[in-house]
Image (tube, rainbow, N blue to C red):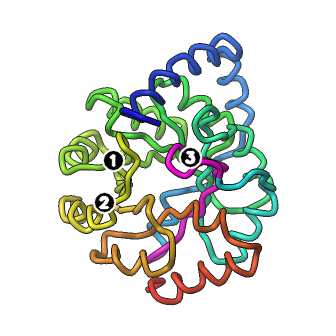
Amino acid sequence: MAGNILSKIVKHKKQEVAAAKNKVPLSALLAEIMKLPANRNFRDVFENNDFTIVGEIKKKSPSKGTIKNAINIKNIVQIYEKAGIKAVSVVTDKKFFDGNIEYIKEAKKHCSMPILRKDFVIDEYQIYETRAARADAILLIAAILEKRELASFIRKARFLNVTPVVECVSREEIKKACAAGAEIIGINARDLKTFKINLAKVKTLVKYVPKDKFVLCESGINEPKDVDEIMVDPKIKGVLIGTMFMKAKGEKQIKDLAGQILNKHGR
């Protein structure tokens, strides 16, 4: 995909959200939310563990193309849990990542781990949609939200008992996220405009995150030694890994890969 990939995704997401509002009005989401039990605590994963892995479920991406043609959600989350992974990220964007919000419900049904919804959130409606889908946490991307909007979304997510994770790719975005009230900062090694990876950027940016925040490193982990490169600061409480696990050849390899990382960094 040429040009600014993020702007293309956001442009389409506006159309997608408008269609979703027509199909399922906010009143219907609220009615569904009222029937739901309490969420699992995504923040506790970072509070109660020195280091953790968030295992991701995704079928494709603009940078990698198709990663996995067919996925068995039940099988994946159960393997992740057996491997010592403490939380799951589910990519729900349809057009660019071949995701589905229904994957969250399926994942929640078959594991005891908290679930993070990973999408391009541009409208408060999506936060209600996230809670109705039974997700425990939501990714908010600082690059596509104004400061006031980001702060409002963080408050709304917490009101709905959904933990906000704010993704940042620059020092300025970290400052904006902290000012907006973020507690969990996701530092993305991927440039969201070009989708290119730079792991060294994580080591630079983590210095600007206040000590009272948790840091989750996202993207660019293709082998266990990549984690070694970024583990430079005690604020880094975990890594989000998708492609490496999704491309793994079965349960044994996923367990082996996760084990190598956890044995070295699970302080």
Give the quadrant of residue 99. Answer: top right
Q: Is residue 245 found left or right of 143 in the rendered image? A: right
- Tell me whether the residue at label 1 lies in contact with that at label 2, contact meaning CB atoms closer than 8 angstroms: yes
Q: Secondary structure at mark 1?
A: loop
- Tell me: 98 left or right of 211: right
Find residue 2 and report its image quarter: top left
Spatial CA span between label 1 and label 2? 8 Å
Q: Secondary structure at mark 3?
A: strand
Residue 33 visible in the shown view: yes
Q: Residue at x 60, y 58 (%)?
A: 56
3D distance between C-alphas at marks 2 and 3: 29 Å
Q: Residue at x 48, y 83 (%)?
A: 266
Numbered range of the magenta stretch: 49-66
Most distant residue in the front direction = 2
Name the spot of residue 178 as percent of width and height, x first: 25, 47
Provide the secondary structure element on which disc 2 rests. Answer: loop
Q: Residues within 10 Å of mark 2 (few under 14, many from 20)?
A: some
Q: Quadrant of residue 200?
A: bottom left
Does residue 9 lie above or below 25 as drawn? below
Residue 38 on the magenta segment: no
Compare residues 150 and 162 and report the one nearer the observer: 150
> Nearer the N terminus, badge 1 or badge 2?
1
Q: Is residue 204 above or below residue 73?
A: below
Where 132 sits versus 14, above or below? below
- Residue 151: x and y in percent read 32, 34
What residue does disc 1 label? Answer: 182
Residue placed under numbered mark 3 in the picture: 61
Kindly report which numbered mark, 1 or 3, lies closer to the viewer in this rendering: 3
Which tag, 1 or 3, sits closer to the chain's start? 3
Q: Which mark is residue 213?
A: 2
| Amino acid type at mark 2 | Lys
